[in-house]
Amino acid sequence: MFHRLVPTMKTTTCATAVACGILTVAARAPEKYDAVVVGGGPAGLVMASRLSENPAFRVLVLENGPETYENINVTTPAWEVRLPGTQFSWNFTTVPQPALDGRAIPLEQGNGWGGGSAINYMAYCRGSRSVFDEWASISGIDELRWDKLLPYFRRSAQLTVPDDRDYEQIINSTVFGPDNVHVSYESSTQYYPIDRAFRDVWAASGAHDADLNAGDGIGMILGGPSAVNPSNGTRSYALPAYGWKMAGRPNAKMLHGARAIKVNFEGTRVVGVDYVDLACGQTHTVVAPEVVVSAGAINTPRLLLLSGVGPKEHLAEVGVPVVVDSPDVGARFKDHPIVAMMFNASPQFVTARAFGDPATLAPLLAEYRANGTGPLSVPGGSSFATERVPDAVLDSFGVDVTFQKQLPQDRPHLLYQYVSGPMLAAPPGANAVSSFVALVQPEQAGTVQLQTADWRDAPRVGARYFGSAGDAALVRYGYRKLLAMMRSAAVDAVSAGELYPDYDVTSEAAVRGAIANATITFHHPASTCSLGHVLDQRFRVRGVQGLRVVDSSAIPVLPTCHLQASVYALAEYAATVLAADFW
Ligand SMILES: Cc1cc2nc3c(=O)[nH]c(=O)nc-3n(C[C@H](O)[C@H](O)[C@H](O)COP(=O)(O)OP(=O)(O)OC[C@H]3O[C@@H](n4cnc5c(N)ncnc54)[C@H](O)[C@@H]3O)c2cc1C
Ligand SMILES: *[C@@H]1O[C@H](CO)[C@@H](O)[C@H](O)[C@H]1NC(C)=O
Ligand SMILES: *[C@@H]1O[C@H](CO)[C@@H](O)[C@H](O)[C@H]1NC(C)=O
Ligand SMILES: *[C@@H]1O[C@H](CO)[C@@H](O)[C@H](O)[C@H]1NC(C)=O
Ligand SMILES: *[C@@H]1O[C@H](CO)[C@@H](O)[C@H](O)[C@H]1NC(C)=O
Ligand SMILES: *[C@@H]1O[C@H](CO)[C@@H](O)[C@H](O)[C@H]1NC(C)=O
Ligand SMILES: *[C@@H]1O[C@H](CO)[C@@H](O)[C@H](O)[C@H]1NC(C)=O
């Protein structure tokens, strides 16, 4: 079933026969496909693998980044921390953030087969049902309602619950299916003993156990689940889950090291794509009547803008000829910003520090290689809790909290999570662990725009983290609460001292400063080419023919927890729509 060598998966075209620079674009007969999918992340690989199930339908997938599967840093869950900033990452940074004393925040995205699913932290969570009901009302697609999207969630993921869990988690196994992404809970020997202290402190603050994959968004979870294949403790991501299914099909071709730089039009009708073979810099033109852009929430609007699909004033400003004025391309950017704190775990707790010392790493590696278990087989931070802040507390902020209060009652505002290693710079040798608070229903939207018309130049990621008074007040409340929880007796019992910010950070001004220094991102950007705004009910970009967008950028409203589960389900649904239209 699983192939080590994948016959039709090619590095690049020029790595085979054609010497770079000898043949020009014009000298090569353009390749023809029925559809080109741009981007080999979760959405792109679902689309291409589903569309190529029809053997008469020829699909090309273009992926900018490299092969990922053979890389041990991708496949080993605990090595997730090694991936941002490498060849597997787009090294985006936001513009300076006014609410964060002008700091610019790194916002890496996945680059390579599997996209973000190849470098993410593997948490698997669907969250509040009302989010999907809102997707349906914004998009006009009734099938996106939670009850109707559930079959697509099921289609995309299978669940394993180990039988040696000593913790009674509420788990509704009917919301998973038999195939594709492996989602697994950790056994009691796998989750870190220190997780218990976090669970206790969240419970003491009022959180209750819940299954956050079956429609509920408010509650807490210990030890998973994560996108990990329990048979050998490896990352379960879009390449093994979907990509390989098409790898042997003669009608499907997967090219990596291939950057789409422009969707080509005749008038307003798509005729194909230009891509650059990154190994040699040569540009190729592919002919296809349908292009599906699945390049992620930053690169999808970027490619549309480079192709002349976007707000006409912005396109004029950077000098891109307008194909269609589509004012919402790149607008409505939302992300989950997070603020971290760190403390020194008592020495008896195994943390990521163990991985840095050959003597403590050796037995862990031996266990992982022999049995696929132990600390290397888990993401190391799969326990979390969410909170809906009561109206009375929101009112006490003394700012406009209309948005936060009118969110449906099943939605949390904040998510608190634990991580078994440092999330901020830690002193050498520290046994650092982290906890953070995330704003999961931000009010303030941002933008993605071009800086120039050159495909090489980084886009301008205009995040506006904590950009409304309500968002800013909410995160201050959440960070204060996080600090109070982490300074309580239950955590004191497992702590050898706070590393960040510091026990004396208690005043309003000091907390604001600590937040400004310790804000990072959950890497969940979305909504930059949203359904209901840029896209119609069949995922078509309005105003042109032959162009669709299916990925995190199409999502109308951020889910209340981690993003990938929703991307897989949305893509599974979109695949049925596109297959009906294309085949
Ligand atoms: C560091 C990190 C941690 C995360 N942690 C979690 C987590 O724990 N749980 C969770 O649920 N979610 C997590 N996420 C988010 C999740 O991975 C993303 O939401 C998801 O991958 C989005 O899928 P996508 O298909 O929309 O886009 P992406 O995953 O971004 O895929 C887009 C693909 O398109 C390719 N591409 C882009 N432009 C071009 C182009 N011009 N030509 C060709 N190819 C192109 C990219 O290289 C990429 O492979 C994390 C993400 C990151 C980056
Ligand atoms: C994995 O990451 C480590 C540490 O960053 C690096 O030294 C090593 O070269 C990487 N391995 C591969 C196969 O990329
Ligand atoms: C991000 O930076 C790394 C390290 O410099 C580099 O290898 C990688 O190619 C960069 N990513 C992209 C998409 O340019
Ligand atoms: C499991 O989840 C489904 C979907 O939300 C729901 O219909 C069902 O009632 C749940 N079952 C239990 C036992 O909670
Ligand atoms: C893990 O197991 C799966 C089968 O479930 C297999 O396809 C994959 O190659 C294995 N991964 C590694 C890195 O051994
Ligand atoms: C692998 O698991 C077996 C059975 O539980 C155990 O006896 C063995 O010690 C483990 N191997 C390592 C290297 O941990
Ligand atoms: C935040 O960073 C600034 C500049 O590095 C520093 O002066 C300040 O003390 C930091 N504040 C906290 C709370 O860490």
Image: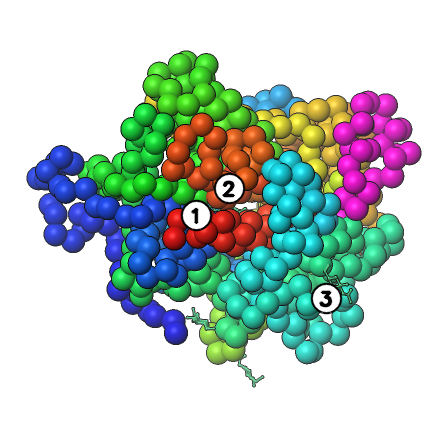
484 w.r.t. 312: above or below: below
Q: Which numbered disc covers residue 538?
A: 2
Q: Which numbered disc covers residue 448?
A: none
In the image, the segment drawn in magenta is 383-411
- Give the Cα distance between marks 3 and 2: 31 Å
What residue is shown with label 1? 581
Tell me the quadrant of the picture where the N terminus can be found.
Answer: bottom left
Q: Position of residue 108 (x, y in %)?
A: 48, 40
Residue drawn at point x = 59 percent, y = 67 percent: 177
- Tag 2: residue type? Arg
Asked if the stretch drawn in magenta spans residue 392, the answer is yes
- Tag 1: residue type? Asp
In the picture provided, is 337 more to the left or to the right than 325?
right
Is the Cβ of the residue at disc 2 closer than 8 Å to that at disc 1? yes
Q: Nearer the viewer, residue 518 or 291?
A: 291
Q: Which SS class for mark 2? A: loop
- Ligand 4 is within 8 Å of the C-beta of the residue at disc 3: yes
